[in-house]
Amino acid sequence: MTFHPVPPDSRRNSGFFLATLVDAIAIGLVLSPVRPVDAGTPGSTGDTTADRELGQTDFTHTMFDFGGAAALSGLSGVAVDSSGHLYVSDSINNRILGWTSAGAFANGDPAQLVIGQPDFYSYRCDDGTAVGDVEGTGADSLCGPEGSAVDGAGNLYVADTIDSRVLEFARPFLSGVTSGQSAAAVFGHHGSFVATTCNDGGASASNLCDPRGLALDAAGNLYIADSGESRVLEYNTPLNPSSGETGAGDTIADAVFGQNGIFGTRGAMMALPWATSAGEAAIPCAVRSVSPSTQTEIFTYPTPTTIACSSTTRR
């Protein structure tokens, strides 16, 4: 058998032919019509629909820090009631998580209760599902909750900061539900559960804007740090109308700290009333001091519910 080498020109022509063939195939793929593939259902073949999910509990959830009842993100408040129930403000996930016992809590334990979401794997702002909700906003929704507090009866108060309101949930661990509980009362928005606008209708005793901190005293009076309005509001025993306190039993503020004691005033700083001169008998609403370590001004209100404050301005 005689071997005949391929001439150089033939090899060069063969390479050109192969390159031309590849180019033609590529052009044909680009120009040829693509056969449409219909979307199907999970588990079916011949479609463009995913059939399995890893990293989330199902196809409809997209939680940022997946982990369900054990996940937390952007913590901003903690409260423990007299029965030992632990509540944590999981702000970025727009919810409050509750553990049955703060004393028995172990590292990594999942929460037994979630407030502000319909389940442990939902996280969106105002993701409520209750009847009467408007676009997810209602008595069962939260958006960026921060401060929380509990009263002597075990009722939970939550500063629903982005929604400019405070919600009260009646003894959550006795409600009979572990998710999606609806609030029993709302502070702000003139009592509406579906409003979210900061200071809607103007600054007043019935509105809030960006509330953050909460506290309750032994008598059941509620104090709200209304940060967007640069003031603190006091509600006299809002859940006990028979306490004998002025304005008891409603969600309208009964006293305002800052803003010269005027509910309808807004300002960048808390305007604190002082006596007009050293010789007058008027009692200042606050005593000013300066922290030696941080050089920060501190204002102390002595027994705020019993002292009559002067409405005059310091000179």
Image (cartoon, rainbow, N blue to C red):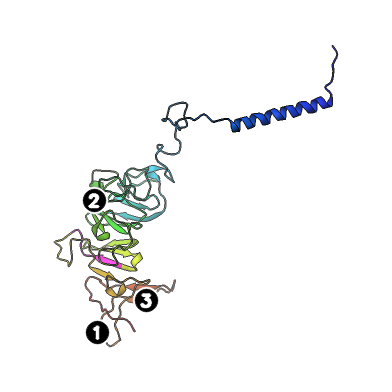
Residue type beneath disc 2: Arg
Res. 289 mark: 3
Residue type beneath disc 3: Ser
In the rendered structure, does residue 52 fall within the stretch colored magenta?
Answer: no
Which corner quadrant of the image does residue 129 belong to? top left
Vertical placement of 26 versus 84: above or below? above
Residue 299 in percent (x, y) is at 34, 73
Q: CA distance from mark 3 to mark 1?
A: 20 Å
Which corner quadrant of the image does residue 5 belong to? top right
* Residue on which the image places disc 2: 171
Q: Secondary structure at mark 3?
A: strand
Q: Residue furthest bottom?
A: 279
State the residue in front, 83 or 43: 43
3 vs 1, front mark: 1
State the residue in front, 34 or 151: 34
Residue 215 in percent (x, y) is at 29, 62
Residue at image location 44% in from the left, 71% down from the top = 294
Q: Which residues are magenta?
A: 232-239
Residue type beneath disc 1: Ala
3 vs 2, front mark: 2
Vertical placement of 56 versus 188: above or below? above
Reading the chain from its start, which is encountered first: label 1 or label 2?
2
In the rendered structure, does residue 233 fall within the stretch colored magenta?
Answer: yes
